[in-house]
Structures are given as structure tokens and as C-alpha cells.
Image: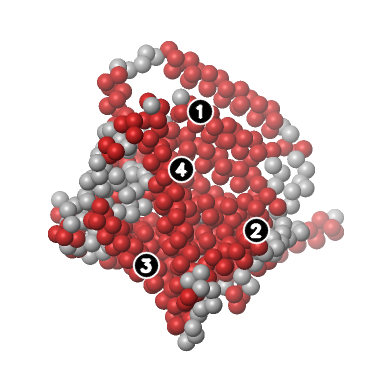
Amino acid sequence: MATTALFFIFAGIAIGCALSLVYNRNPLYSAVSLIGVFVALSCIYITLAAPFIAAVQILIYAGAIMVLVIFVIMLLNLDDDKPYRRLGYLYALGGFLGIVLLAQTFFVFWAVTKTTKPAVAGAFKAEETVGRTMSIGTNMYTEYLLPVEIVGVLLLMAIIGGVILVRRLSQPELELVVDNELARRNEAEEADDYRIEL
Amino acid sequence: MELLKQFFPLIVSAVGIVVVFGIVMGVVAYTVLAERKLLGWIQGRIGPNRVGPWGIMQPFADLLKFILKEDLIPDKSTKFIYFLAPVVAVTCAMMPMIVYPFGPTITSIDWGFLPFGIGQGLHALPLVVARLDIGLLYVLGITSVGVYGIALAGWSSNNKYSLMGGLRSSAQLVSYELAMGASVLGVVMLAGTLDLSEIVSQQTRSPFKWYIIPQFIGFIVFLIAAFAETNRVPFDLPEAETELVAGFHTEYSALKFALFFMAEYINMFTVSVMCTTLFLGGWYVPGLSYIFAVGSIPYAIFSFLGFMAKLCGFLFLYIWVRGTLPRFRFDQLMNFGWKFLLPLALINVILTVIIVYLVN
């Protein structure tokens, strides 16, 4: 009973925040709404007896990724008077994806009601350990080791990519880059002159 | 009666939250006074001594002043976020306090005196509001959300000094969060759990079991990162007076400023609790179990006092450092965080992994 009530409260908050995320013109308001969505989701995870996932949701999405998003918004200081009409074709795409999502939800709902519930003893035993930190760790490093390793390599690639993008060039390299850029610009200017002459 | 019996644990939790809130607020109020007194002594002054004997009523006078002052709101600010920011800051600072283990479990009370038999089945009274399996992650996660209070305050005030303060602080907090998270990994590996109460109970056999001994590097990294996470001197760049007026809270006045002020001191309390719990054995006082029976009320009281003594040691360290050290420059801060502290924490993690593997 209490769990159902909590679910509806947090689901309502999540949906409200998601709507405000989509409808706000101010990007910072959208970002703050997205944080609201993440927090409400993590509360739902707690009611589903998955505290570890809830903590990680807060720690990574709300605590780290959204900080960077807000950082960028604060630095860019976007003006909110842009014409939105040029993105009109996305309405059709969005509607289509929405219908697909709705169909998926109904399918999951239908599939859950069709399956028989597991025996009471088994369900109780599962509740004891599933979702605990220890069981998640054990599963990650035994049964799901390959996906974990793949994700690790992927993240390492992203880190190396980031480091390469922001590294400071040495003096000769920097001169080379600047020379190339200047040469490109000169060509472009010459081409422009040529066009004007024509 | 059945209903009352069912809701009894909830009532106990609610009472526990109120008590913990009172303790934290009391400590926070007197940390402010202690800071002003100690800074006075360090700088050869007397410090506040007008309100009450030795100035002990000063925190209440300060609070009254904050409540009664005019609350100014900048005309061009983003109103909703301007209101939201201090609320976020202080809420995120307060939320972790439910998982702090303040003392041992009391087992000697007979709960039969409670009416209607609601005490049946109750044997132990743990001195912690909620024992979470993910206690440590919970604290780290909630405190990491506290960044928004500062960042949004800086942005919504529509003031260049506030904005610079907010930007600096979000960069600083995100950077030092990594080092902080990596520095506690060693303790988590040695303890094999994220539950703070369990981490403490593993250190309660002797002071040589305290994790400060095998995890000395982790302790130092955690302490330095904690200074940065709480925006304290020498890492108080978000509110560097000489450059940024007052940083992110330049435009805040009256009670909203008081909320930021409170959040900063509660955060100091939080990291001091974490230092004590993770590295210094929490509420464990060596030799106390020979004097009092484990689980009795005096044992719990003296354990709690030991916990508070360790905590106040860290709070004193904070104030002492503030009175002694100058401020970092921003590029020095970033280089120190990313190029020294984070690698050191990662080396500590690798060393711990090797040692744990060899021992097992």
C-alpha cells in the first residue's frame, strides 16, 4: 500500500519534471528539471529494493554529468529567442517514437500479467540479496565479466580521446598547425578574390 | 493497537531524526562561535565576548540578526532558481546525517515498560537513524548534489562575481570529488562493505585496527579533498574576498545567506564524521569495554563522547588551518587536484588491491 502510494508520488514528480524539461525555453530550467527526473527515478529504485542502483544514479547522473551540463550552460549563456520552426520535421519523428514507446510499455505490462508469479519461498529468498552491493559486485565480476571489461575499454578510449583533444601542442607542432590554417585561409581568400573578379 | 505497533519503528526513526538534527545543529552553532574565538586567539584578539558569559550566546544573537534583517532580492535575478539554490544547499547538507553511527547499539534496556506491548520484539537500540547497505555511497552521492546549490546561486544572482564564484566552485567540487571517492576505496576494500556502522564495528577491537594505519595515504588524500569539498581555506576560491567580493553568495542576504552559511558548517561536520568513521574507529574508545559492559548505557554515553571528541578534533583542525594558511591560486588548485591528489589516491587503491590479494 505505502509502496504503491510512494511509487505514484515519485512517478508523478518524474513525469512533471520531464514535462517541464521539454517545455521550458530556458536551458538552465530544463537542466534543473532533468536533475529532478533523476532524483525521482532514484527514489523509485529504492522502493524497488535496488539501493545500489539508486545511489549510483544520484552519484553519477545527478552529481557528475548534470554538473558538467549546467557548467556548459552557465558558460555559454544561451539566448532563448531562437526560432524553433526549423526543427518542425522532428515533431513527426517524436510522435512516431512516442507511439513505439507506448506500445512497448503496453507489451511489457501484458507480458508481466501473463507470467505466473514465482513461488513464495523463492521470492523471499531473492529479496534478501538481490540489489545488495555484494551481490551486484559478485555478479559483475563473474557472470557479466565480459560486458564489464568491454565497458571499461570503452571508457578508457573516451578518456584517451579527451586527453588528446585538450592536450597542449609543442611549439613546432603548434607552428605547423598555425601554418596549415593560414595556408587554408589564404587559399580561401584567393578563391574569394577570384570569384569577385569573375 | 496493531496499527500503533506497525508504526512504532517509524515513530522511533522520527524521534531519532529530531535528536540527530538537534545534535548537529548545536554542534554547528557552536563551531561558528569556536571558529570566531579561535581565530581571535590566533590573531592576537579576544573574539566575541559581549553576548552572555564568554560570548556563549553569540550563535543565537547571530541567528536573530539573520532572521530580522531585510531580505534583498536582485531585480534582474532568475527568481525561482535564486530561491531554490539555498534550499538545495542546506537540504543536501542535512540529508546524510541519518546514516552517521553516533554510538554503539544499546542492548541492556528492557523495553517492557512501554504501553500496549509495542516494545515487544525490540531488543537493541542502535545509535544510528538508518543503517543503509549503501551508507557511504549515500553520503558521497547526496553531498555531490550539494554542488548545485552553489552553482545555481552563482548563476541566478545575475552578478559577475557570483557567476565566477559559481563556476569556480563547480569546477573545484567536481575535481576534488574524484580524489575523495578514490581515497575511500581503500577502506571499502579492507572492510568489504559500504555500511558505515559495519565499517566502525570492524575497527572496534583495538586502536591498531583503525584504518588510518593501513590507509594512511587514503586518510591524507581524504582530508585534503575534504577541505576542498567544503570550500574552506586554503581552497576557498569560490568566495575569495580579495578577488570576488564574496563569490557565489554576494547577492544573498538575511536568512538565505544564513542557509548557505549553515550548509557550509554542516558540510564541515559531515566530512569530520566521515574522517572519524572511516579512519579513526568511529565511536570506539580504546579500553572502555574493560570499565563498562558492552551494550550498557554508560558504555554508549562514553562512546558517544569519544566520537564527539574525535569529531571536534577535526573541526579544530579546520579552524586552525583557516587561521594559518594562505589561499591557493586557481590554476594551482586544479593542478594539485588532478596531477597530484587523484594519482596519489589511485596509487593507494592499486597498492591496497595488491596487499588485499596477497593477504587473502
Q: Which mark is residue B312?
A: 3
Q: Amino acid at mark 2?
A: Trp
Asked whether B187 or B318 is in front, the reply is: B318
Q: Residues within 10 Å of mark 3 (few under 14, many from 20)?
A: some
Q: What whole-number distance in Å separates the C-alpha atoms at marks 3 and 1?
A: 42 Å
Discs 2 and 3 share one subunit: yes
A129 lies left or right of B154: left
Q: Amino acid at mark 3?
A: Cys
Residue position marked by numbered label 4 in the rendering: A57
The image quarter containing residue B270 is bottom left
Asked whether A92 or B338 is in front, the reply is: B338
Asked whether A32 or B97 is in front, the reply is: B97
Q: Can residue B200 be seen at all in this image of the molecule?
A: no
Residue position marked by numbered label 2 in the rendering: B155
Q: Amino acid at mark 4?
A: Gln
Q: Residue A24 appears at what percent x and percent y?
A: 69, 42
Q: Quadrant of the N terminus of chain B?
A: top left
Earlier sequence position, callout 2 versus callout 3:
2
Residue position marked by numbered label 1 in the rendering: A5
Point out the frontmost of discs 2 and 3: 3
Asked whether A119 or B52 is in front, the reply is: B52
Q: Can residue B10 be seen at all in this image of the molecule?
A: yes
Q: Residue A140 appears at what percent x and percent y?
A: 31, 39
Discs 4 and 1 share one subunit: yes
Q: Report if the CB atoms under discs 3 and 1 are less than 8 Å apart.
A: no
